[in-house]
Image (spheres, rainbow, N blue to C red):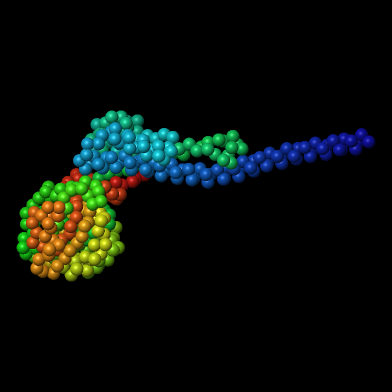
Amino acid sequence: MKRNAGKRSRQHGERGQILVVAVLSLIAMIGGVSLVLEGGNAYAHQRVAQNAADAVANAGATILAERLGGGSQGDAQVLAATANVAALNSLDSYSAYYTDVDAKLLNPAGIVVGNTSAAAQVGGGIIPPNTQGVQVTGNLTFPTTFARVLGMNAFRASADATSVTGALIGGLFLPVVFPVNIVDCAGDGSIAGVGEENWEISEPGDPPVGQEYIVPLCKTDAGSFMILDLDGTMNNCDDEVSDPPNIQFAAFPATIQSDNGNNCAKEMVDEVNKLAGKVVLIPICDGDCVTAGGSNAEYHMIRVAAFYLDYMSDVNGGTNAMCDGNGTTLIPIAGNGSSSCLAGWFVRYVTKGPVGRGTIDGAGAIGIQLKR
């Protein structure tokens, strides 16, 4: 009897050990599953943190874009904009520093530095010289769900983003070009005069608040009507308007070939007018254009203009009442002898797109580019 009792005792002990191992294995399995499931939760919140950091960086760069365009915004405005967007995106904390157009950190003197410890911080009271960007690190604490069984009640997600601003060097361009010396057009349609400085920049609105212009679409010397070949296919300007190619130039100035002028213009008028009430991007040409070859013309682009489009009109010869204006609210740019024109407002338009070095002159468009 004693021998059997000992055997039963050993069996109960073994069963107890198996139960402990099973419980521990179950806990480990639950913990493993919890961490796997929590990984998906963490990934989702990491994306939230990244989107928030992107938004904060873009908010800071937008203020810098306004400053670049001639505004008086300072560090306090950059801080207010970034703090507001950080709060709207539920970031627990964030840090922001000023950069140059290449997304390199700057110290208060505007010198490139290698780390944030020496960099000028947003909210420090100074926007350094050469500043054209904001670098942001955002932090987001979020509660766990399944990982609570392991005593992990919260995780933290962090994300970095940098947004820079500068002269726009790419985008969806309208295949029409303005020469900077297009103050007026002679009766034969050729350009004459100088004076981009006379182009008034209108304030935002729908329509914009400011002077609406008739912009003559002139030829230069013996050259063609000023239409650009942006997609490399001739005689399809209407397609280039309805389905514009997304072009990025390495830098300005850049040379663009022309498309066949007057015939091309007639085909594209209807497509252009579908864009009425929108801001379009139009390359600007300086006086260094080779146009004697007619349809083989080359145009020397120096910047991009933002133009709030009212309408486009084209008449094959003779006068065009739509290009005459009314002398007050709608006036030609210092005169007009052209039978083709665009009507609208030059605006200081800030858009997302690739940016480059250089000053913002005249009607030049400003871009904001997100970098990471």
Is residue 348 or residue 225 the one in the foreground?
348
Name the residue: 31% across, 39% down: 60
User: From this viewpoint, is residue 253 visible?
Assistant: no
Q: Is residue 161 left or right of residue 234?
A: right
Is residue 211 or residue 167 the one in the foreground?
211
Q: Is residue 90 left or right of residue 253?
A: right
Taking the view exactly as shown, the residue that stands out farthest to the right is: 1
- Give the quadrant of the C terminus: top left
Name the residue: 21% across, 57% down: 310
Name the residue: 80% across, 36% down: 13
Quarter occupied by residue 104:
top left
Q: Tell me if residue 328 comes above or below residue 242 in the rendering.
A: above
* Residue 41 position within the rendered picture, expressed as x and y whole percent measured from the top left: 52, 44
* Residue 130 position within the rendered picture, expressed as x and y whole percent measured from the top left: 23, 38
Quarter occupied by residue 27:
top right
Q: Is residue 28 left or right of residue 349?
A: right
Q: Is residue 16 left or right of residue 301?
A: right
